[in-house]
Image (tube, helix red, strand yellow):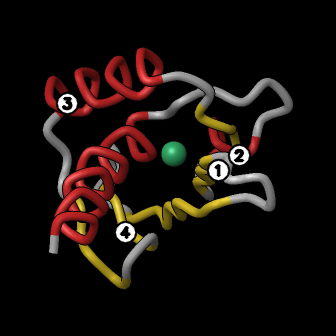
Amino acid sequence: MFILESKAQLEKAIAKAMKTRTTVKFISFGVYAVRGSKGNFYTVKCERGEHGEKIVSCDCKAGQSVKPLVCFHAAGALSLHVGLARQRQTA
Ligand SMILES: [Zn+2]
């Protein structure tokens, strides 16, 4: 799990997702299933914390590590989530 602190961090994650081109399945707003390198799916959750912080969690190994990093599943889910969140705001 990690907290997105800056826009740059988010943009970096999305750029990473574009490169890897994984499959992202929409489950519900903020919950996505992202295909891993072995064809298995990981669940990624994008939610808002108590103080409005953007919290992203993934159930893969990298997402669970002590030193959290933006794994490409989280990046893939984020690229979809950001688009959906934007649509919601303008709707
Ligand atoms: Zn992951």
Q: Quadrant of residue 2?
A: top right
Foreground pick, 58 / 87: 87
- Work out which quarter of the rendered image holds the C terminus and state it: bottom left
For the residues labelled 2 and 1, the Cα–Cα distance comes to 7 Å
Which of discs 4 and 2 lies nearer the camera? The answer is 2
Residue 1: mark in rendering: 2
Q: Earlier in the sequence, mark 4 or mark 1?
A: 4
Are dots 2 and 1 in contact, CB under 8 Å?
yes
Left or right? Give the position of 33 relative to 31: left
Residue 20: mark in rendering: 3
Q: Earlier in the sequence, mark 4 or mark 2?
A: 2
For the residues labelled 2 and 3, the Cα–Cα distance comes to 20 Å
Kind of residue at disc 1: Ile
Looking at the image, is 90 positioned above or below residue 31?
above
Identify which residue is drawn at 49% across, 34% down: 71
Which of discs 3 and 1 lies nearer the camera? The answer is 1
Which residue is labeled 1 in the image?
55
Kind of residue at disc 3: Thr
Q: Position of residue 5 (x, y in %)?
A: 62, 27
Q: Earlier in the sequence, mark 2 or mark 3?
A: 2
Secondary structure beneath dot 4 equals strand
Label 4: how many Cα within 10 Å (few below 14, some 14–19, many 20+): many
For the residues labelled 4 and 3, the Cα–Cα distance comes to 15 Å
* Residue at disc 4, CB closer than 8 Å to ligand 1: no
* Residue at disc 2, CB closer than 8 Å to ligand 1: no
